[in-house]
Image (cartoon, rainbow, N blue to C red):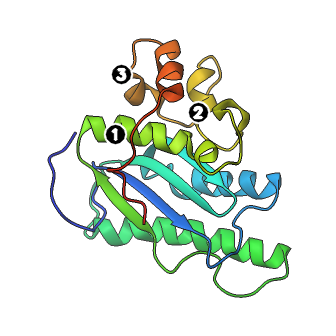
């Protein structure tokens, strides 16, 4: 893991927790088709520039845990990487607004991000992201939520766009991964506001 620097800019080679909420009381995802379309947009805009370790999409917000790839000959890394997210969010919002005959901003005006600087924080964040639907009362069991990367980790025989190898280094077996996600983990150090 690269060393810590205090900056709000995206930089290649670093791991980030990225998240944003719907504008006001709007929903980002109303039906299954919305979730699938958003994931398709992630494949188009984010996979070329980042390895995704985890994600969770819930009706009014989403979380991504990723490491930006080392990109050659990019003068302004932050601008280039933000442009990819802008394309993702704007493309999704335009399609969403058209589908539901709505106008205006779908997402908050800013994309929240926090650089991940140590392994303890990284594994707790993985737990937090995958358990987000449980924590918000959407499901009682983590296995019941379809719109997260959790299933990619427990179904290793199935191919995935999730970079599982890096995160599985912290667990001896898939069963250890499952048991960790069923355990109680303190989130007091995770700032999502």
Say which of 148 and 83 sits in front.
148
* Sequence-earlier tag: 1 or 3: 1
Q: Which residue is mark 2?
A: 150
In this figure, which residue is indicated by the disc labeled 3?
Answer: 169
**Residue 69 in view here:** yes
Q: Quadrant of the C terminus?
A: bottom left
- Indicate the position of residue 149 as horizontal and vertical percent values: 58, 37
Q: Position of residue 150 (x, y in %)?
A: 59, 33
* Position of residue 119 in the picture relative to residue 152 (left or right): left
Residue at left 25%, top 68%? 75
Task: Provide residue 168's location: percent of width, then percent of height.
Answer: 42, 23
Viewer-closest of 134 and 112: 134
Q: Which residue is mark 1?
A: 122
Q: Is residue 11 left or right of residue 142?
A: left
Left or right position of 161 against 104: left
**x%, y% of residue 143?**
68, 30
Could you say which is closer to the camera, residue 39 or residue 55?
55
Circle 3 SS class: loop
Residue drawn at (51%, 44%), measured in percent from left and top? 129
The residues bearing labels 3 and 2 have C-alpha atoms spaced at a distance of 16 Å
Secondary structure at badge 2 equals helix
Local SS, label 1: helix
Residue in view at x 27 percent, y 59 percent: 11
Label 2: few (<14), some or many (≥20) within 10 Å?
Answer: many
């Amino acid at each position: 893991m690269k060393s810590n620097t205090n900056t709000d800019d995206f930089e290649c080679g670093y791991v980030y927790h990225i998240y944003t909420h719907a504008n006001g009381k709007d929903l980002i995802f109303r039906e299954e088709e919305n979730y699938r379309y958003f994931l398709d947009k992630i494949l188009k805009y984010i996979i070329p520039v980042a390895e995704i370790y985890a994600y969770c999409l819930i009706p009014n917000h989403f979380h991504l845990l990723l490491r930006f790839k080392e990109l050659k000959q990019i003068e302004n890394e932050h601008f280039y990487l933000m442009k990819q997210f802008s394309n993702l969010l704007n493309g999704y919002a335009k399609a969403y607004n058209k589908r539901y005959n709505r106008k205006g901003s779908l997402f908050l005006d800013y994309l929240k991000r926090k650089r991940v600087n140590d392994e303890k924080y990284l594994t707790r964040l993985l737990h937090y992201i995958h358990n987000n639907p449980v924590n918000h009362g959407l499901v009682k069991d983590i296995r019941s939520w379809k719109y997260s990367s959790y299933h990619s980790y427990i179904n290793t025989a199935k191919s995935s766009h999730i970079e599982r190898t890096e995160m599985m280094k912290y667990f001896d077996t898939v069963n250890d991964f499952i048991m960790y996600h069923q355990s109680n983990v303190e989130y007091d150090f995770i700032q999502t506001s």
